[in-house]
Image (cartoon, rainbow, N blue to C red):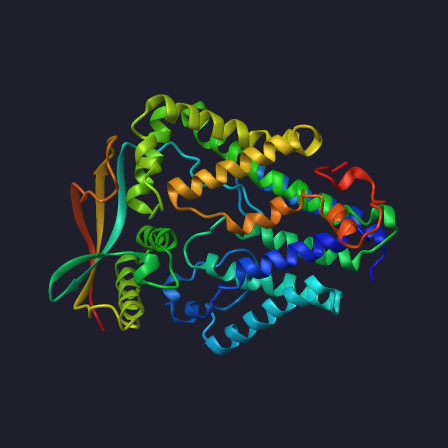
Amino acid sequence: MKRLAPVRVVTYSLLFLIYLPLDDRGWTQVSAVFWMPISLFHLLSGPPRNAALIGALEVLWKLSLVTSAIGLFSRISMFTAAGLGFYLLGLPNCFGKIHHLDGFPVLLLAILAAGALLRGRSSQSDWPIRLAQALFLLVFFAAGYSKLRHSGLAWMTATNMRDISLGELFTHTPPTPLASYLARYTWLCGLGAVATVIIELSALPAIFLRRLRPFTLAALFGLQAMIALMLGVYFTPHLAGYALFLPWDRLYAKLRQKPDTAPACNRLSLS
Amino acid sequence: MLPSRLAAPAIVIVLAISVFDIATGLEHWPFGSYPMYSTVYPQRLSWLRLYGVTAQGEIPLRGDRDFAPFDQARLIMALERIQAAPGAKQNLDDALHNLAALYNRQPEHPPLRALRLYQVAWQLKPGQRGTEPPDQRTLVAEENAP
């Protein structure tokens, strides 16, 4: 479990910081006409109406992220974080549109909680990290595959990239005029379209090829940074996914001034 | 603590659902097929937009700024889905009524007399900045503020 401990500290701390501003109480004021439940939310009779209860659940969830990070009542804390995370991060998605930002953090919380419950021999203790790493990379492969499935090679044209960039100027609030700048150059639009799909598709082989992984992760991070600057869509919760690939075990060992005895397989590796 | 031999089936189930959603394009949140921006975009952009009627005339409104907890993308998608579903007229009226109440909860906003939902369109051209007015507007629904 040595390698799980630093990952747990980093993951829960990051998620706490990322979701500290989360406030779902406003959804109690939204009309039932907007209620379009997803997933297990179909089991509910309608949108929540008790703002005080939602507020209390939020406090409990954020507290459970902290106690999970520091390892206090760790199993109960991690299960609370996973259960309440599912509800609180899923709730906004029941009002018209699934934002694909919070799905991975919910899966990550569930995997870490399951890992705490299914603790076995030390040789098997890394499976939650490896599974979460694989799911994180699959998120990006899915996005690339979706583009080819829905649009084929037509997605990878300069015209399409130009229209996406220009369209987002009217429908979102990008923080920079980069999209407007990009749309002026056909070659830049074409390059951006082709690079986007190739980078996203490379996430699948990166699950199996250790040497490819750092390049793919760096390219994906750059891609998401460009999306944030150009389109105003922020994938901040995915920082927890990128963090899974960093060698926290080595840093942890250095901080404790102990020799790093962990095998190399947790360093940008699934195998 | 459960036996560790249950880890293998758990891993298989999680990966199977994930691969199933990717292969089929279905969404079983928190799993999904991540279809955002996956279609070819038209050069003529059509979009719903909300305008508030104040004493000074019509002002364009935005989801994230004016209708919290909605953000712009979620609000417009929700309105599109309501518009496309059975009972659209009544449901859109109810939706606008609720949105006007959400808007008026924020004291810094100028009071609304009415809320209007338009279908707006732009012909996309290089050089645009996103501040250009739509070249076409069609009124979809209107609701007096509560």
In the image, is A264 to the left or to the right of A193? Answer: right
Q: Quadrant of residue A174?
A: top left
Residue at 66% across, 54% down: A10
Residue B29 at least partly seen: no
In the image, is A43 to the left or to the right of A155? Answer: right
Q: Hey, which residue is sitting farthest left in the picture? A: B56
In x, y percent, where is residue A74?
Answer: 74, 65
In x, y percent, where is residue A17?
Answer: 56, 60
Q: Give the position of the N terminus of chain B as an image quadrant.
A: bottom right
Residue A197 at least partly seen: yes
Residue A180 vs B90, above or below: the answer is above
Residue at 18% across, 45% down: B133
Residue B109 vs B64, above or below: the answer is below
In the image, is A22 to the left or to the right of A175? Answer: right
Residue at 69% across, 64% down: A68
In x, y percent, where is residue B135?
Answer: 16, 41
Camera-side residue: B139 or A4?
A: A4
